[in-house]
Image (cartoon, rainbow, N blue to C red):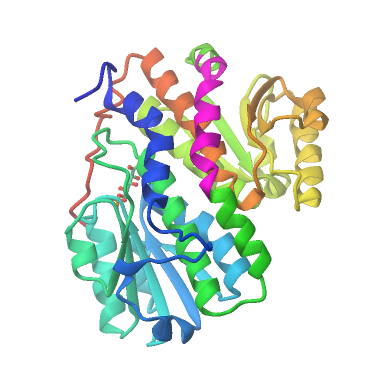
């Protein structure tokens, strides 16, 4: 049931703190040790891994892109991310020491399933991250880590995306632990920080109302561009995808540093550009770099919609609109920076009179290749 909301999507957006908490529940022990018993891959198996390949489609692919940053940083294992529909057609290099992580909310996406089958034929180990118990992809994988988002009815992925991120963080932390990486203190700090994330996501929801007003004001825009750096780049991609699928509008995401290599020519007077600003903590360089990217586009007439952490006063002079999110470590920032993008796309689509639960031409699970 819609629980008093007009659309499932609205309900699923507000359920996110709970979904995040449920996905963490029972997986982090008192001493900060992680237990992922449904993994069915031994610590021994995981110690041998020399490469990780993440395969997924759509929003799940964006979760994979974000996961790469923390997995490589915490585990020091090379990690590639690829859309499932491209994967097996390029003769990828896989072996017994490759861990393939297949991310799929439904567990039924045919592109991802075919990639999983291919990977297993090549003797790679496959771990599924999935939201639907007993679905095909986890059944055909060596191990599974379920996201506990609960059923998602709206076609656009929202709460399942946040819980996929949690699952990816857990896998990364777990791998770092079993492989005894030298980041012990940092790993423990992240585990502590993860426990606070439901509350931080709730804070975003509590302060998101101005985003709705802003979204309605952009209902007639021809395009919206999204910029990010580091983990903010895949978040920008997710923001653009949400807008396309729900509002049927042109939207495109760029790595902020790449803009000057061509796409900046798109910037003209009044073009709305949503920018995700990295946390200042530990990533000061990135933060400064994006400030100059914002200045560049603003000087060319862009209307800048800046998502930045609370208290980041340096961005204020360049933000036509400022959306504040809680200050969290950069690697975890996607959990809070994605939420205003979801609300933005949903509200804009509603302003256009679209059905946000059943966008045109789309199905909840895509069972053809
Ligand atoms: C976007 C969306 C799709 C799915 C994609 C993969 O909001 O929902 O892009 O993310 O079709 O689906 P799953 O995760 O079920 O494999």
What residue sits 19% from the left and 25% below the top?
A: 1
What residue sits 56% from the left and 15% below the top?
A: 210
Q: Position of residue 100 (x, y in %)?
A: 38, 72
Query: Is residue 239 on the magenta stretch?
Result: no
Q: Is residue 159 left or right of residue 74?
A: left
Task: Choose between 49 and 225: the one closer to the eye.
Answer: 49
Q: Is residue 9 above or below residue 335?
A: above
- Could you tell me what secondary structure mostly forms the magenta stretch? helix
Region in magenta: 195-212
Q: Can residue 311 be seen from the camera position used here?
A: yes
Q: Position of residue 335 (x, y in %)?
A: 52, 43
Q: Is residue 347 above or below residue 257?
A: above
Q: Can residue 93 be seen from the camera position used here?
A: no
Q: Position of residue 339 (x, y in %)?
A: 49, 33
Task: Choose between 55 and 171: the one closer to the eye.
Answer: 171
Task: Choose between 123 and 175: the one closer to the eye.
Answer: 175
Identify the residue at the far front of this view: 30
């Amino acid at each position: 049931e819609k629980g008093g909301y007009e659309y499932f999507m609205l309900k699923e957006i507000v359920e996110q703190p709970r979904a995040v908490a449920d996905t963490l529940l029972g997986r982090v022990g008192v001493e900060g040790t992680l237990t992922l018993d449904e993994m069915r891959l031994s610590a021994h198996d995981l110690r041998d891994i020399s490469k990780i390949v993440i395969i997924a489609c759509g929003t799940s692919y964006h979760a994979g892109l974000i996961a790469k940053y923390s997995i490589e940083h915490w585990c020091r294992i090379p990690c590639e991310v690829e859309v499932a529909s491209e994967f097996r057609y390029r003769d990828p290099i896989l072996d017994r020491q490759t861990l393939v992580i297949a991310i799929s909310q439904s567990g039924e996406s045919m592109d991802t399933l075919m990639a999983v089958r291919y990977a297993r034929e090549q003797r790679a180990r496959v771990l599924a991250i999935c939201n639907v118990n007993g679905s095909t992809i986890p059944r055909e994988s060596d191990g599974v880590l379920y996201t506990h988002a609960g059923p998602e009815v709206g076609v656009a992925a929202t709460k399942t995306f946040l819980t996929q991120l949690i699952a990816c963080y857990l896998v990364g932390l777990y791998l770092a632990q079993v492989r005894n990486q030298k980041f012990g203190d940092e790993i423990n700090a992240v585990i502590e920080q993860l426990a606070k994330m439901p509350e931080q996501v709730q804070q975003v929801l509590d302060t998101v109302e101005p985003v709705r007003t802003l979204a309605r004001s952009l209902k007639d825009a021809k395009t919206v561009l999204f910029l990010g750096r580091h983990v903010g780049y895949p978040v920008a991609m997710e923001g653009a995808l949400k807008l396309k699928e729900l509002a049927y509008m042109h939207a495109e995401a760029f790595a902020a540093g790449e803009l000057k290599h061509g796409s900046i020519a798109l910037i003209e007077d009044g073009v709305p550009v949503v920018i995700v600003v990295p946390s200042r903590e530990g990533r000061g360089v990135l933060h400064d770099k994006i400030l100059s990217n914002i200045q560049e586009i603003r000087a060319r007439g862009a209307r800048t919609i800046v998502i930045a952490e609370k208290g980041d006063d340096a961005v204020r002079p360049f933000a036509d609109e400022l959306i504040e999110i809680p200050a969290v470590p950069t690697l975890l920032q996607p959990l809070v920076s994605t939420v205003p993008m979801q609300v933005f796309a949903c509200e804009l689509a509603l302003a256009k009179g679209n059905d946000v639960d059943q966008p045109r031409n789309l199905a909840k699970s895509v069972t053809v290749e």
